[in-house]
Image (cartoon, rainbow, N blue to C red):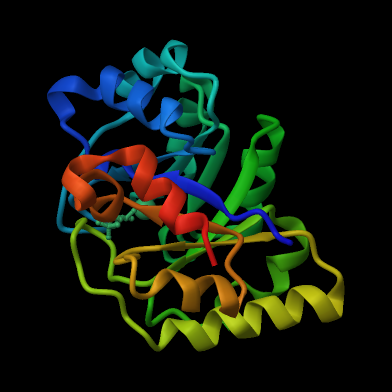
Amino acid sequence: MKKIKISPSILSADFSQLANEIKRLESGGADLIHVDVMDGHFVPNITIGPPVIKSLRGITKLPFDVHLMISPVHDYIKNFAEAGSDIITIHPEATNNLTDSIEYIKSFKKKIGVSLNPDSPIELIEKNLNKIDLVLIMSVFPGFGGQKFIPNVIEKIKRLKKIKETKNFNYEIEVDGGINFSNYKKVIEAGADILVSGTTIFKENNGDIKKNIEILRVL
Ligand code: DX5
Ligand code: ZN
């Protein structure tokens, strides 16, 4: 039985208490910490950057699953690697050469993720699937937490799972955006290995993080 990993997004956390919120996630059973980095250019919102990641690094041993919604992204990879990211996920539209950016992330001995927006086809990244550790399927258009899940990404998850199995690739499939208690089972059954959730984990059941993470794991 596949163990589903949960990567809570701190975008929905209380930013005035980020260290405590990360400790709550760790004691609540999170497997990774999803850090949404936004630049107000690639997406219409601005969040945090390398200094905040660096200051949070000592708070937890959990891997920082860093989602870079910034462009151009290539020249910032070093900063995020040195700040303590464990997985660095980029969008193909945010770099002039995806293969170069993938190799650059690998040069820092970090895991490499590539993210597909709801309207970005698998073809955009197909020739690089053999080089990456993670495909981050966006089930909302990036930029904000609390948005509604876009159901037609389910087909994309199924296709990526099929490609992975038939070509014996190693990437994990992570799904991000609008995951809640009524859609998470469909997402897992379609082939997700990791679920990102912000609103559901921080807000449901009066903010009982442990309970919310447990629910998202049960099929
Ligand atoms: C959106 C971010 C997501 C978002 C998830 O641009 O990439 O990680 O924070 O938050 P919810 O679970 O509230 O959709
Ligand atoms: Zn994200």
In the picture shown, does residue 166 fall above or below 128? below
In the picture shown, does residue 105 fall above or below 22? below
Image quarter where the N terminus lies is: bottom right
Expressed as whole percent of the image width and height from the top left, the position of residue 154 reads: 48, 83
In the picture shown, does residue 105 fall above or below 149? above
Q: Is residue 73 visible?
A: no
Of residue 146 and residue 132, the one placed in the foreground of this image is 146
Expressed as whole percent of the image width and height from the top left, the position of residue 59 reads: 41, 14
Task: Locate residue 128 relative to residue 5 in the image: left or right.
Answer: right
Task: Locate residue 118 relative to residue 14 in the image: left or right.
Answer: right
Expressed as whole percent of the image width and height from the top left, the position of residue 116 reads: 47, 70
Quadrant in which residue 172 is drawn? bottom right
Task: Locate residue 44 relative to residue 112 in the image: left or right.
Answer: left
Expressed as whole percent of the image width and height from the top left, the position of residue 47 reads: 21, 39
Image quarter where the C terminus lies is: bottom right
Q: Please tell me which residue is depicted at 74% across the width and 80% down the height of the picture.
A: 163
Of residue 148 and residue 138, the one placed in the foreground of this image is 148
Quadrant in which residue 152 is drawn? bottom left
Q: Quadrant of ligand 1?
A: bottom left
Q: Please tell me which residue is depicted at 18% across the width and 21% down the height of the picture.
A: 17
Q: Please tell me which residue is depicted at 38% across the width and 38% down the height of the picture.
A: 210
Q: Is residue 219 visible?
A: yes
Q: Please tell me which residue is depicted at 84% across the width and 81% down the height of the picture.
A: 166
- For the image shown, how many numbered marks are present on the structure? 0
In the picture shown, does residue 93 fall above or below 123? above
